[in-house]
Amino acid sequence: MVDVGECDEEDAAGWQRACELVAAARRITVLTGAGISTGAGIPDFRGPNGVWTRDPRAQRLSDIDSYLADPEVRRAAWRSRARHPAWEAEPGPAHRALTELANSGRLRALLTQNIDELHQRAGLDPELVLELHGSMFGTVCLECGETGTMRAALRRVAEGDPDPSCERCGGILKSATVSFGQALDPEVVRSGQRAAMDCELFLTAGTSLTVHPAAGFAELAVRAGADLIVCNAEPTPYDDQAAAVLRGNLDEVLPRLLSVPTVPNSSPLRTWGDPSTW
Ligand code: NAD
């Protein structure tokens, strides 16, 4: 038995199961979402204080068709990038707990929907991080694909160009993130699928699991035989597929869950492995 501390009976059963799974797992894939960074001061989209919960019109800034069609949407997007809380944010206890997990050698991969680079800033090996939706610290030209830094683009905004265009071809410039209506990088998706199928335990943290294809990795992992733990403040569509659901604040939940001592596990690894090696 693992000491799960003080909680009600249902919670205690979930914690007991989650701690047992973490203790025995030799290969863990994690999917994080905006909820892991709310403690660092970056609001999520759909939580009670989410950007879209407070102002549904803000969704237009993340929609590629509106971005392409409407210069005012682009100007608003640049203003919003300049004052984004990620510029000031520091990684918190939940980010650091995942870095510790990686240091223990059991993290197969960390798939993140976040664009804030807080996992890397918490010391996680960038090789283990798969940024499913890109990073807000880069820019890309939607015409010729030229890439650059957000700092350089925002300097041009500060100098009086409210909608800076590509300096190479004049095309529309955007943050190097995946907006709604844009496809994910197919190589990133394939790597995510491989990591989902190549783990004993798939853990989701701070994601509403409503954005696809990211959310689908949880289902893929379960179908490939992994146990699923969902850590999120609110219910998700995958809770009923989870071996355990933990509802608390991630800055408390993850340090507590991931510091459970490992137990020897001599059973054969039951993962489908990396399909590229089949
Ligand atoms: P989401 O807003 O849909 O869901 C976040 C979930 O986290 C909510 O269900 C909320 O209840 C939960 N949550 C919030 N704070 C929590 C906490 N402290 N402890 C436990 N749970 C907490 O976010 P999503 O599922 O990541 O998907 C939305 C999209 O938002 C992604 O594509 C992502 O690119 C983008 N996004 C990223 C950031 C970021 O980089 N930090 C911020 C906002 C949105």
Image (cartoon, rainbow, N blue to C red):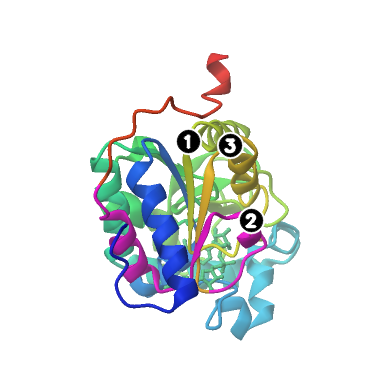
Q: Residue at x 29, y 72 (%)?
A: 5
Front of the two marks 1 and 2: 1
Q: Earlier in the sequence, mark 3 or mark 1?
A: 1
Is 53 magenta? The answer is no
Look at 60% across and 70% down and name the residue there.
Answer: 235
Q: Residue at x 51, y 71 (%)?
A: 44
Tell me the quarter of the image containing the N terminus: bottom left
- Residue 33 lies, in percent from the top left, at 50, 60
Cα distance in 3D space between marks 1 and 2 = 29 Å
Residue occupied by mark 3? 225
Amino acid type for the residue under numbered disc 3? Gly
Span of residues in magenta: 234-261
Q: Is residue 104 above or below residue 3?
A: above
Amino acid type of the residue that numbered disc 2 sits on in the rendered structure: Ser
Q: Is ligand 1 less than 8 Å from the beta carbon at label 1?
A: no
Is 9 located above or below residue 241 in the figure?
A: below
Query: Do the residues bearing badges 3 and 2 touch, measured as CB atoms within 8 Å?
Result: no
What amino acid does circle 1 point to?
Answer: Cys
Which residue matches tag 2?
179
Q: Which residue is mark 1?
A: 199
Q: Give residue 150's mark.
A: none
Query: Relative to residue 158, is residue 47 drawn left or right?
Result: right
Q: Which residue occupies the foreground of this view, 141 or 58?
A: 58
What residue do we see at 59% from left, 65% from top? 208
Q: CA distance from mark 3 to mark 1?
A: 9 Å
